[in-house]
Amino acid sequence: NCHNGVQSPDLRSGKSYQALTRAGFLKLPGETSLFYIQITTQSDHIPRTTAAEKLKILYWINQGAINN
């Protein structure tokens, strides 16, 4: 339900993968990915995302960000 489709990227279920890949939010290495940077450095994202979730996202990006 992140952003509720109001703000880019649209992270609603069924739309998030295309929104992240088409808008260039994902790139390798994952540490340089805009998506990863936003969830780890912006104060409004930090309390909502656990350390384990951040690592899972980083691993996912580094493994090629498969649409799964």
Image: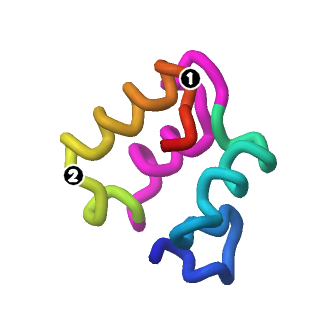
Q: Residue at x 64, y 36 (%)?
A: 26
Does the magenta segment cover residue 40? yes
- The magenta region covers 27-44
Residue marked by disc 1: 64
Secondary structure category for the residue under label 1: loop
- Quadrant position of residue 11: bottom right
From the top left corner, tell me how far across and down residue 49 is, in percent.
Answer: 29, 56
- Quadrant position of residue 15: bottom right
Q: Residue at x 68, y 75 (%)?
A: 7
Please, which colouring scheme is shown? rainbow
Q: Which mark is residue 50?
A: 2
Circle 1 crowding by C-alpha within 10 Å: few under 14, some 14–19, many from 20: few
- Quadrant position of residue 48: bottom left
Three-letter code for the amino acid on which mark 1 is drawn: Gly
Three-letter code for the amino acid on which mark 2 is drawn: Thr
From the top left corner, tell me how far across and down residue 37 is, in percent.
Answer: 51, 40
